[in-house]
Image (cartoon, helix red, strand yellow):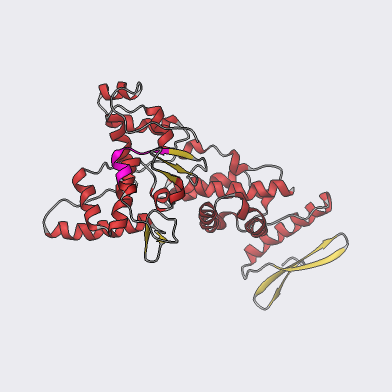
């Protein structure tokens, strides 16, 4: 047994010399083989300090510092919450490493492991974004010289979109009829404007201009304000929505609170509707609240709306995202959508 390995109780400890000073440290293992590996790492760290004069920093120390100093102001609260979920997934691969040990190979190992766990590509990409954020902070602190998570080619894990389910008029009306009146109006506005459910749930009266027939969204997924035009039916939906004194939310419940989880509320209503439809031997409803946005987009183009206007209305950063709706059009409708021929529900305007 090496002189620099010894036991205290059942735990192995290591002993090395750093700049003439005797350093002893628990290796936190009862396995001799693992103790030898950790002692070797302990020696490498000591050599690094002796050579560079800088102490190495562990991944776990980086996560703690990042979560306190860097994360809160660098991303939106929802994104920060998702990143913290990713940190748990990152820990098994990176938790015992120093940040300077994280390279392309360790990042690739993490991705391969997540793929074997049958995790979705979207989740893996979010995990990599979290890791990139951590290493980006380390780069700013001078702890590392590169960010291999940022450099990783994400083209090999392209994000797969959920298949679009276009709801029928009957299915939408069934959901609205089963919903509390205020929620029913929220679903209706999603269908009429293509807004995201969180955008509608967070809509305030100060953002609505009925004379101008538009809604100005200031809190969006891309953080870019945009104007959403209102046709006659959408104007009617908004104008007919009762207001609550001392509450600026357009869609509210109880004492004027906004709906915090509209997608969850939609799912609960759909399950309730499907239980009744099962009794009546009617086909169950499968669409999500977000599919009302897809239905609006396809209807807009089928009526002759211009795809570039639609891009602005929906708030897509890239026209390629909007072009997915062309798959639901006839060849003639596709040609018209590129030239804006026909009746449109409204025209996007810059904010």
Which residue is drawn at the image coordinates 43% and 30% (left, top)? Answer: 319
Which residue is drawn at the image coordinates 49% and 35% (left, top)? Answer: 155
Residue 158 visible in image: no
Residue 177 appears at what percent x and percent y? 22, 55
Please give left or right for residue 62 compared with residue 77 in the image. Answer: right
Please give left or right for residue 268 compared with residue 120 in the image. Answer: left
Which residue is drawn at the image coordinates 87% and 59% (left, top)? Answer: 19
Relative to 133, is 269 above or below? below
Residue 154 appears at what percent x and percent y? 51, 38
Q: Quadrant of the N terminus?
A: bottom right
Which residue is drawn at the image coordinates 29% and 47% (left, top)? Answer: 188
Residue 309 appears at what percent x and percent y? 40, 29
Is 156 in front, or is 43? 156
Residue 176 is a magenta residue: no
Is 69 in front, or is 336? 336
Is 328 in front, or is 344? 344
Seen as rendered, the residue at the extreme front is 211
Please give left or right for residue 2 compared with residue 77 in the image. Answer: right
Please give left or right for residue 238 compared with residue 65 in the image. Answer: left
Q: Which residues are magenta?
A: 228-236
Residue 24 appears at what percent x and percent y? 77, 68
Residue 264 location, quadrant: bottom left
């Amino acid at each position: 047994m090496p002189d620099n390995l010894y036991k205290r109780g059942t735990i192995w400890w290591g002993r090395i010399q750093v700049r003439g000073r005797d350093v002893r440290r628990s290796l936190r293992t009862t396995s001799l083989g693992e103790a030898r590996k950790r002692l070797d790492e302990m020696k490498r760290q000591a050599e690094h300090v002796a050579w560079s004069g800088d102490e190495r920093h562990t991944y776990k120390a980086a996560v703690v510092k990042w979560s306190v100093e860097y994360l809160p102001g660098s991303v939106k609260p929802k994104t920060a919450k998702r990143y913290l979920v990713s940190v748990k997934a990152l820990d098994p691969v990176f938790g015992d490493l120093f940040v300077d040990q994280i390279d392309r190979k360790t990042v690739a190992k993490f991705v391969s492991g997540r793929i074997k766990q049958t995790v979705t590509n979207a989740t893996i990409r979010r995990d990599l974004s979290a890791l990139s954020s951590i290493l980006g902070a380390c780069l700013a602190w001078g702890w590392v010289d590169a960010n291999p998570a940022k450099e990783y080619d994400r083209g090999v894990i392209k994000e797969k979109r959920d298949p679009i389910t276009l709801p029928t008029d009957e299915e939408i009306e069934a959901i609205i009829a089963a919903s509390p009146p205020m929620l029913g109006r929220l679903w209706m506005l999603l269908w009429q404007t293509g807004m995201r459910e969180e955008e509608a749930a967070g809509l305030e009266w100060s953002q609505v201009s009925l004379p101008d027939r538009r809604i100005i969204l200031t809190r969006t997924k891309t953080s870019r304000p945009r104007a959403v035009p209102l046709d006659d039916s959408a104007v009617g939906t908004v104008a007919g929505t009762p207001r609550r004194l001392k509450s600026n939310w357009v869609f509210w419940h109880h004492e004027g609170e906004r709906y915090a989880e509209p997608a969850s509320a939609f799912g609960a209503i759909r399950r309730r509707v499907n239980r009744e439809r099962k009794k009546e031997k009617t086909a169950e409803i499968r669409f999500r609240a977000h599919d009302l946005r897809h239905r609006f987009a396809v209807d807009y183009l089928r009526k002759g709306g211009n795809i570039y206007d639609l891009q602005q209305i929906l708030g897509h950063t890239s026209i390629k995202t909007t072009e997915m709706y062309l798959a639901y059009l006839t060849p003639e409708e596709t040609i018209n959508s590129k030239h804006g021929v026909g009746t449109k529900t409204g025209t996007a305007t810059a904010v």
